Amino acid sequence: AQSVTQPDIHITVSEGASLELRCNYSYGATPYLFWYVQSPGQGLQLLLKYFSGDTLVQGIKGFEAEFKRSQSSFNLRKPSVHWSDAAEYFCAVGVLSNFGNEKLTFGTGTRLTIIP
Amino acid sequence: DTGVSQNPRHKITKRGQNVTFRCDPISEHNRLYWYRQTLGQGPEFLTYFQNEAQLEKSRLLSDRFSAERPKGSFSTLEIQRTEQGDSAMYLCASLEQGTNLMNTEAFFGQGTRLTVV
């Protein structure tokens, strides 16, 4: 069965500093990988996704992620964080079920705090 | 269209009571998902509809849970005889017909936070 591991429960970063959030997945086939952000009181918003091709994926809000098959990783990065980036970040793998349905399996999330 | 709408946003209920949540997906999105998110966890898949047909249910969806999408538009999720372990955020997402996660995205609502006391 597929699974996603986000080893960092909580990360604190200074505003303007760089950020890297870790994500490791386990899936037997070629994975479809996603990063979502959830701000307090808000729904999940898609930051970026990877299916194939270039392993460095650009997303919204200045985020990027790199797929590394050898490490089963899909880490999220941002060169300079803003106070508005404070939120919960979820990595997910997309799976095609036996019912022809695509569903997402999420990690447990990483809470990002930004300090001045 | 303002996106996926969920009501109520918050619900507090006593153990043993029944509750019902509603999800209005984006217009013309025929695919609809329910997820549950407990504290400190990521969302977990509960069930999936294509139009009015419920095509897949997770093992997490016990017999106290029932979901419907009677006309292929809005959906309801009912929990009967609520238990404290049902306390969670219930999220709804919709996806456009004829698309998949490769060429589009699933749009999530803000969720309904259920507290069972």
Image (spheres, coloured by chain):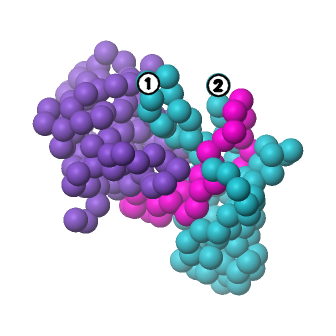
Chain colours: A cyan, B purple
Which residue is denoted by mark 2 in the rendering? A1
Which tag is nearer the camera, tag 2 or tag 1?
A: 1
Query: What number of labels is visible?
Result: 2
Mark 1 neighbour class, 10 Å CA radius: few under 14, some 14 to 19, many 20 or more:
few
Work out whether B116 lies above or below A69. above
Image location of residue B29, percent across then percent down: 28, 49
B77 or B48: nearer the viewer: B48
Label 1 resides on the chain identified as A
Image quarter of the N terminus of chain B: bottom left
Q: Is mark 1 on a helix, strand or loop?
A: loop
Instruction: Say if residue A12 shows up in the picture.
Output: no
Whether residue B67 is visible to the viewer of this picture, yes or no, is: yes
Extreme residue toward the right, this view: A70
Q: Is residue B56 left or right of residue B4?
A: right
The three-letter amino acid code for the residue at tag 2 is: Ala
**Range of magenta residues:** A23-50
- Does label 1 lie on the same chain as label 2? yes
Q: Which amino acid does label 1 sit on?
A: Phe
Task: Examine the structure image and report whether residue A27 is included in the region drawn in magenta.
Answer: yes
Question: In the visual, does A23 lie left or right of A70?
Answer: left
Q: Which residue is drawn at 45% across and 46% down?
A: B100
Task: Please tell me which residue is depicted at 80% across the width and 46% down the height of the picture.
Answer: A69
Which residue is under mark 1? A99
Q: Going 75% across and 54% down the picture, which residue do you hit?
A: A67
Front residue of this view, candidates A80 and B17 = A80
Quadrant of the rendering where the C terminus of chain B is positioned: top left
Mark 2 belongs to chain: A
At a point 37% along the width and 30% down the height, the residue shown is: B47
Which numbered disc covers residue A87?
none
Prevailing secondary structure class for the magenta stretch in the rendered image: strand
Residue B56: percent from the left, percent from the top?
A: 38, 25
